[in-house]
Amino acid sequence: MDLPRPTSSPGLISRSIRIDPPTFGAAFEALPTPRTGWSAPDDALVLGGDAAATITATGTDRFAEIRMGADELFESGDVHAGTEAARPRLFGGFAFHEGGCSGSPWEPFPEARFVLPRVQVTFADNGTWLTVNDASTDATAATVEERLDRERTAIEGSTVVDDRPPRPGIRERRRTTDRRAWKRSVEAAIERIRNGDLRKVVLAQALEAELAATFPRAATLERLTAKYPDCHRYWFEPDDGEAMFFGATPERLVSLRGRTVETDALAGTTGRGETPAEDEWLAEELLADSKNVHEHDLVAETIRAQLEPYAASIAAGSRRVRRLATVQHLHTPITAELDADRHVLELVEALHPTPAVGGLPPAQALETIHETEPFDRGWYAAPVGWIDAAGNGAFAVAIRSAVAEPTRATLFAGVGLVADSDPDQEWDEIQLKYRPILDELEADR
Ligand SMILES: C=C(O[C@H]1C=CC=C(C(=O)O)[C@@H]1O)C(=O)O
């Protein structure tokens, strides 16, 4: 952890001011690297640049280590945030597996990494805010305020025009898993399920796309942000290298505010129709389909059971259909009141991986994933989100995601398998789940 701070230091100093709203592109380009971003249906759009503090961790204790680092960072501070959305928050995520992030394209990504942006632009309901955070020993209110003035000049004076470069186009595609290998893997998993020691497993694939032009970061993220307002959108540039992990996920892992918890069971999928009537028909069919309902209910029941040890009460809504741009999912919203004050990372650790991305029983499912998938999941399908000084936070499951390098993108998508899954249908479902990112890579026609 990189937090030099003697006891005499005031700790974290944070100052915010309201600024004239820059365009997304101007703010993104003006921010120092490595950049971080977060946007959710009930939250402001936050763009972060550089790090006032970076907390990393590895292994089974990674959740507790990040929490200890956050508690230390937030222990004392001189904070004038101006608005709630601009208060100091650590943004980051975890690897799916402990010991993950070994192979390409994950080398630059630690197993867990959270960043308090040094410079942050927050597009909130009550205006656009510029924030400077500093946790170094020589920081004073005066140096932070001077930096804020300089950053304001840089962002408001940014000459970046909002020219939205075209989508890059794809020169070549490479799959980690061809159709034959996929069929074999799915059949083996189904056999294990039928033999009784596994109830459900989520198997994923990766797709590497060589791009015909440089990946346009700002334009892609701006388009994803605008196109998926109902999803959690996120991006993380690691300290080293030129990679960026990003995506727009419909799946919330957990959010905690005070003692109120909100989470979602999201599993069971069908496509979108050509017309509203066809959409409706597909949705009705999904709600009545026993394979999808079983796949979904395993997730909803497990989330409830995982929350139970922490909750004074839990309530689940009715199973419904959540319609997204390219797919429709079965969705059960779940809320809980905690029995005591807790940190959001306790809940993240208890819930990850839900059977929407892992399986049941967890140990057998993870073993099947390890044995079957010929690539490293890295941060795919893992928790990404934020934590604040009070231990509140919001985390999403990083699906519908990719790692972008200057001229290459690696996309990830998975499907839940139960006893009566069909390999061909599951293959098609994976192709649909690549769409949100692929649509941003394929050349404009
Ligand atoms: C694992 C993924 O989706 C999960 C979330 C919703 C529906 C799912 C399904 O129906 O298989 C998956 O459990 C993915 O998109 O990579």
Image (cartoon, rainbow, N blue to C red):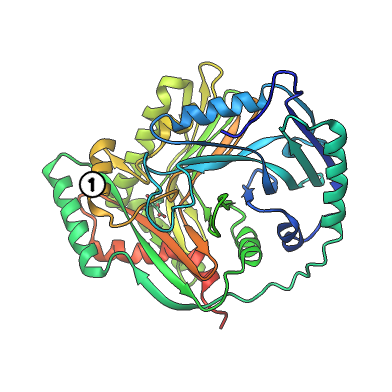
User: Which quarter shows the C terminus?
Assistant: bottom right
In the displayed structure image, the side of residue 229 where residue 355 appears, left or right: left
Total count of labels: 1
- Give the quarter of the image for residue 26: bottom right
201 or 408, nearer to the observer: 408
Q: Which residue is mark 1?
A: 368
Image coords of residue 160 (percent x, y):
78, 67
Q: Is residue 342 visible?
A: yes
Q: Residue at x 69, y 22 (%)?
A: 6
Q: Residue at x 71, y 58 (%)?
A: 28
- Give the quarter of the image for residue 162: bottom right
Name the residue furthest bottom. 445
298 or 29, nearer to the observer: 29
Image coords of residue 60 (percent x, y):
38, 31
User: Which quarter shows the N terminus?
Assistant: top right
Residue 180 to residue 416: above or below: below
Name the residue furthest left. 195
Q: Residue at x 50, y 37 (%)?
A: 263
394 or 25, nearer to the observer: 25
Image coords of residue 257 (percent x, y):
61, 29
Q: Is residue 325 visible?
A: no
* Amino acid type assigned to the residue bearing label 1 in the image: Thr
In the displayed structure image, the side of residue 277 where residue 445 appears, left or right: right
Image coords of residue 288 (percent x, y):
33, 52
332 or 373, nearer to the observer: 373
Q: Residue at x 49, y 28 (%)?
A: 65
Residue 39 to residue 206: above or below: above
